[in-house]
Amino acid sequence: MESESIDPLKRIKQLTSPLGIYQHTKYDRIDPVHGFALEDQARALLVAHTFNNQELCGIYLDFIAKAKRKDGLLHQFYYEKKGGHEDNSSSEKTISAQEAYAMTLWALYKTGNYKKEDFAPIVKSISENALTWNSPRAMSEALIGLTVEEKASPLEKTLFEKLVDLFEKNATKDWPWFENILTYANAIFPWAMWEVFLKRKDKKAFEIAQRTTDFLLETSKVNNIPAPIGCNGWYPKGGEKALYDQQPIDPAYMVCCLEKAYKATKDPKYLKEAAMWWSWFFGNNLKKACMVTEDFACYDGLTSYGVNLNRGAESNICFLFAYISAIKLDIVEEKVSQSNPETL
């Protein structure tokens, strides 16, 4: 049934000011000290566009436009109290910058803004920068956006080939994966491969998508309960798998990946798995804890001692990613119509 009682955007509206969507909260209250992150604006833009909320879209697009640096790339962060933009320069943060740029590219392509006057120069600068990326997550995020075009661009082909090379270099029979460790947002890899297959009908993309999806499903459960890889140690190849902290981005991306897997294969096992991973948010997890409040806000994580009660931007936007995919799969009881369902 379709419900008029649910406003899926309620939480991100609460987190959004005229400047953008805040990164973090203390419990349910905005914590402005941490400011605004470019990556969150891009993710939120995808969700706002899906539900055709033009006011929110305008705020997030304005943030992206104003984040432009003199070199054509974008500042990663904006701090209201400091009155300015900032970036990070360590190698770890360089990876995070690549992922923020990739998320922006994805959002601008999927929302149809990539050719518009205000954003075409940004897309050009990010696309040139993307040729130097070494973050496979950034490559995957960008691929999802780039598949919007009717013909594969040189950048799409390059990033796809880089991911294929990474897979072939690192994959073994018992570890069919792109890296020698499972960390965060793992499902973005097979999700991107499914997108390439669905748009380009590439057999290599299908093969890798299927193998990595099945591997991730096999390794991310405990007693048949969804158990995303924990951030306190991750899961190195041949090592011990961390169970906590589990972050909502992981089950959310898994639902999205499985929606594409089912679309590509019509294999009912992927539909069943999607429903199982969607249920992680509602208590089908190792702590049997509901991760969603009565007003449809998502908590920030599942820890060894219980629920992290903060309710920040990433968790809530990613939860809505999963909700959108769950609606497409018809595995939710209460649905809200989407004006642009193919945004994700």
Image: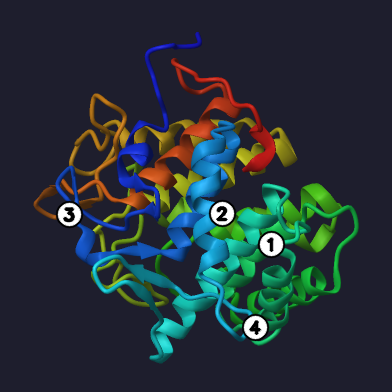
Residue 140 location, x and y as percent? 62, 65
- Which quarter of the figure has residue 237? bottom left
Crowd tier of the residue under label 3, counting other residues whose Cα lies within 10 Å: few below 14, some 14–19, many 20 or above: some
Quadrant the C terminus occupies = top right
Number of numbered tags placed on the structure image: 4
- Which quarter of the figure has residue 295? top left
- Label 2 sits on a secondary structure element that is helix
As displayed, is residue 51 above or below residue 107?
above
User: What residue does disc 1 label?
Assistant: 118
Please tell me which of labels 2 and 4 falls first in the chain.
Answer: 2
Please tell me which of labels 4 and 3 falls first in the chain.
Answer: 4
User: What residue does disc 4 label?
Assistant: 169
Going by the image, does 57 lie left or right of 105? left
Please tell me which of labels 2 and 1 falls first in the chain.
Answer: 2
Q: What amino acid is at disc 4? A: Lys
Residue 247 location, x and y as percent? 31, 54
As displayed, is residue 316 above or below residue 202?
above
- Label 4 sits on a secondary structure element that is helix
User: What residue does disc 3 label?
Assistant: 303
Q: What amino acid is at disc 1? A: Asp
Q: CA distance from mark 1 to mark 4?
A: 39 Å
Residue extending furthest toward the front: 83
